[in-house]
Amino acid sequence: MQTIDVSIHIQAPVEQVFDLMIDTEGCPSWLKDVSSAKLLQQGSEAKYGVGAVRSVRQSGITSVEEIVKYDPPNLFEYHIMDSTLPIRHELGRVEFVSSGDGTDVHWVSRAEGRHVWGLLEPILGRSMRKSFKSILEQARAELET
């Protein structure tokens, strides 16, 4: 099991950072590797709240995620239900904390490779860490311009 743990400080209000990161349908406009993102099912209490299911195609990989915890603007948690990448996903958690001139974002996700991918977990972990860090850097660039 690989744990991906990345953080960044973004000079923007916590509500603005949370809204950008949770907005599935808007992410293709600012995330360069996302070719499509769709909300398949709205959440029970809020559009992107608990129970929301979204499909994201990034760098040729499609993942279907369910939001399992939603506490705006503090955090959301998700579970990858299905992916073209053979992984078993335990949980992803993205936290947002107002800090000085902006927002600290902390993203943790746990997954393991299935089948032959299990042998390549260290490589998979490095690749996912690089991807998550890139997403956070693109969010910072989008909000700080």
Image (cartoon, rainbow, N blue to C red):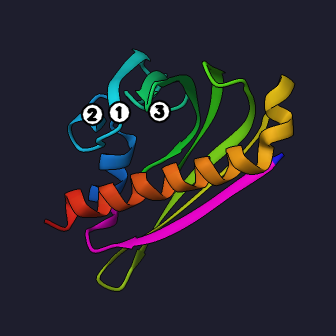
Q: Earlier in the sequence, mark 3 or mark 2?
A: 2
Q: Is residue 8 visible?
A: yes
Label 1 near label 2: C-beta < 8 Å?
A: yes
Label 2 near label 3: C-beta < 8 Å?
A: no
> Which image quarter holds the N terminus?
top right
Instruction: Name the amino acid type tagged 1.
Output: Val
Question: Element type at marker 1?
Answer: strand
Image spot of residue 141 (x, y percent): 24, 62
Label 1 near label 3: C-beta < 8 Å?
A: no
Image spot of residue 5 (x, y percent): 64, 61
The residue sitting at 29% across, 41% down in the picture is 32
Name the mark on residue 49: 3
The residue sitting at 65% across, 54% down in the picture is 126
Q: Is residue 43 visible?
A: no
Against 143, residue 1 (above or below) is above
Q: Residue 116 lies in what quarter of the image?
A: top right
The residue sitting at 48% across, 59% down in the picture is 133
Q: Could you tell me how far apart the alpha carbons at marks 2 and 1 are, in whole angstroms? A: 5 Å
Task: Report whether 61 appears left or right of 29.
Answer: right
* Residue wearing tag 1: 34
Q: Earlier in the sequence, mark 3 or mark 1?
A: 1
Name the mark on residue 28: 2
Q: Residue 14 lies in what quarter of the image?
A: bottom left
Q: Residue 4 lies in what quarter of the image?
A: bottom right
Against 99, residue 128 (above or below) is above
> Which image quarter holds the C terminus?
bottom left
Image spot of residue 77 (x, y percent): 59, 43
Is 4 inside the magenta-drawn segment? yes
Task: Report whether 55 appears left or right of 139.
Answer: right
Stretch of the chain drawn in magenta: 2-14
